[in-house]
Amino acid sequence: MAAIKGTNTKPELMIRKGLHARGFRFRLHDRKLPGRPDIVLRRINAVIFVNGCFWHGHNCSVFRWPKTRESFWREKIGATIERDRKAVENLQDDGWRIAKVWECALKGKRRLLLPDVIDSLAIWLSSDTDRICIRGQPY
């Protein structure tokens, strides 16, 4: 598990590259914010989380519960889900707009087209909508 990256993942890099090409400027992994969002756009008070389906327990075709050490993994992934929920709640209380992009939106057989995902985020960033979730359960 030590070799698994938590930052600068391929899905995250794809989103960053697309948003930068559209003219959005941002900071990365702000440690001062709850949940340490992947992308922070302070000027428009918005954050974007790019979540891996396995590590964040997304109920999709990409996620499978491991067959070994089931109780360990259920506890570990359950704690991550709870930590994510609290981070989103704290960010919302502080007035941040929040976007989540799930890994399955960018990978796998049922992935969305990257330009469509970037378009959705760009439209959301230009709007007044508080939240968006791409390929996931609504908040």
Image: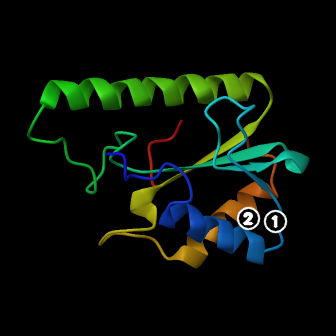
Q: Amino acid at mark 1?
A: Phe
Residue located 37% across and 43% down the image: 55
Kindly check if marks 1 and 2 are in contact, taking CB atoms under 8 A apart as contact: yes
Q: Residue 73 is drawn in which quadrant?
A: top left
Question: Considering the image in quadrants, where does the C terminus appear?
Answer: top right
Q: Is residue 119 visible?
A: no
Residue 66 point in image, percent of width and height: 15, 42
Residue 51 point in image, percent of width and height: 48, 49
Q: In the picture shown, does residue 75 fall above or below 7?
A: above
**Residue hosting label 1:** 24
Q: In the picture shown, does residue 131 fall above or below 92?
A: below
Residue located 45% across and 48% down the image: 136
Assess disc 1: are there few (<14), some (14-19) or many (≥20) residues with their C-alpha within 10 Å of its C-alpha: few
Residue 75 is left or right of residue 84, and the answer is: left
Q: How many marks?
A: 2
Label annotation for residue 122: 2
Identify the element where label 1 is drawn: loop
Q: In the picture shown, does residue 37 fall above or below 5?
A: above
Identify the element where label 2 is drawn: helix
Residue located 38% across and 68% down the image: 107
Rounded to the nearest angstrom, the CA distance separating label 1 from label 2 is 8 Å
Residue 80 point in image, percent of width and height: 42, 30
Q: Residue furthest left?
A: 67
Q: Earlier in the sequence, mark 1 or mark 2?
A: 1
Q: Residue furthest right?
A: 43
Q: Residue 15 is drawn in which quadrant?
A: bottom right
Instruction: Name the one closer to the observer, 120 or 5.
Output: 5
